[in-house]
Image (cartoon, grey):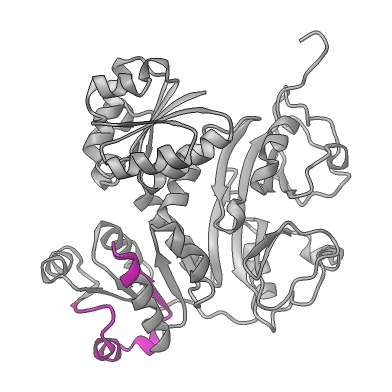
Amino acid sequence: MNILIVGAGIVGFNLAQELSHEGHDISIIDSDAEKIQRISEKLDVLAVRGNGCLPSTLIQGRILDAEMVIAVTDKDEINLMVCFLAHKFEVKETFARLRNMELTGESQVFKPKELFVDHAINPAEIIIDSILKIIKTPGAVNVAEFADGQIFFRGFDVPEDAPLAGKTIEEIREVSELNAFLVVAIVRDGKLIIPKYENRIQGGDKIYILVDHDFLPLVLPMLNKQVNEIQKVIIFGANSVTINLARELDDFIDDVSIIEPSLEMANEAADTLEHTTVLHGSGTDPDLFNDINMKDADLFLSLSDNDEMNILSALLAKKHGAKRTVVITNDPDYLPILDSIGMDVTINPRLITVSEILKHLRKGQVVNLYKLIEGEAEVLEIVATSKSAAVGKRINQLKMPEQSIIGAVLRKDGEMVVPGGSTEILEGDTVIVVTLPDCIGKIEKIFGKKTSFLS
């Protein structure tokens, strides 16, 4: 597919890298000479320096041949203009990253399609939704949902005394009460493992599970003997994300506070939020942490626009007694070290945006996708249509790649099946697959259209 990307920042670069690796014909435009030079040196794509809002630049970037345009600059206005021009050039499909809630949220005046955007991606909305789900799932460090919320994907750190610690995948499945979920990935020493029956869960592991939404409350005690509900939340940074998050938290958490270094932004937040305590101060001030009783904080959310300050403030919050921390970082170079320094939950807007776009590009009836930090693994939601080559076959007949696993099957009647080798894929099933990136092409073929000698 011919794809034009406008914006060569972290998101644009990673999209260009991944999509070109998958065989797509990629062009990318940016006004920054250094970014274009870096892409030209590292990627086999057409890199054009110029203004993406000018038709002449878009033509230079091969928009006349493009089947898809993805606008991911750091300016909403530019992304909207690019999509408008793409519409005029009769491009089939447009994507825009839009950060302003007024363009995508409940208060929007115009729907994205009215602004010539086929798919609008607002990372802030997804970040808020993810944090709320993490708070409502005690102990969770990663959250996603599939099949319209009927299947939960959750990640947990496994304490040494967890009931599941020391058990193999086979032992867990032999207990009928535990056959309501499946461990689909284990992260140990920073490496992601797609587990087999003989793999044993150890204390200190991070595990990912797929579970029917009704059974999640029954599964939680098996992962952690005791996890207290969150009652006190402290947030570092007053921006559009944290202000909207605080409004949501007001509905079910009594004690919510925001720390903001900028007096102007702190005052704006205080004027906007009725029930949230807003404090003007540094995210690294130990006296402020003592005054705000950081030792009583169940959750510290470091969500400012400064990656380095987010990491420092979260580390100090931990030192002053905060039970769990959530850190947002835009720079992917920080991701490998955050687990090792004790950060409980890491949120990366790049992965969020890339995941949202990739799910529209995957083949084989893929309708949803969630990308993991570890190993760039993907969780794919696939609908098995009548034309799918997998329909009518048992899982042990599908020749699934070694580094992939079918973690759940949702039947048309709403029943979730924890699959085994003899589970048959039926027409209309929703199948959740966890896979490492090298296996994605094989998965797409397995669930793609049937082939015949006459076709």
- Give the x, y percent position of residue 124: 35, 52
Q: Nearer the viewer, residue 201 or 42?
A: 42
Q: Nearer the viewer, residue 284 or 235?
A: 284
- Give the x, y percent position of residue 175: 84, 67
> In the image, is 60 to the left or to the right of 445?
left
Q: Nearer the viewer, residue 270 or 202?
A: 202
Tell me the quarter of the picture where residue 176 sits. Answer: bottom right
Residue at the image position 33 percent from the left and 29 percent from the top = 117
Q: Is residue 432 above or below residue 113?
A: below
Find the residue positioned furthest to the top.
454
Q: Would residue 412 be visible to someone looking at this image?
A: no
Tell me the quarter of the picture where residue 369 sits. Answer: top right
- Give the x, y percent position of residue 319: 41, 88
- Give the x, y percent position of residue 353: 43, 45
Magenta span covers which residues? 280-309
Residue at the image position 62 percent from the left and 30 percent from the top = 363
Q: Is residue 193 above or below residue 86?
A: below
> In the image, is 373 to the left or to the right of 353?
right
Residue 285 covered by magenta stretch = yes
Q: Is residue 253 above or below residue 348?
A: below
The number of numbered badges drawn on the structure is: 0
Residue at the image position 70 percent from the left and 42 percent from the top = 439
Residue 298 covered by magenta stretch = yes
Q: Would residue 188 be visible to someone looking at this image?
A: yes
Tell me the quarter of the picture where residue 27 sits. Answer: top left
> In the image, is 250 to the left or to the right of 268?
right
**Could you tell me which quadrant the C terminus lies in?**
top right
Residue at the image position 81 percent from the left and 15 percent from the top = 452
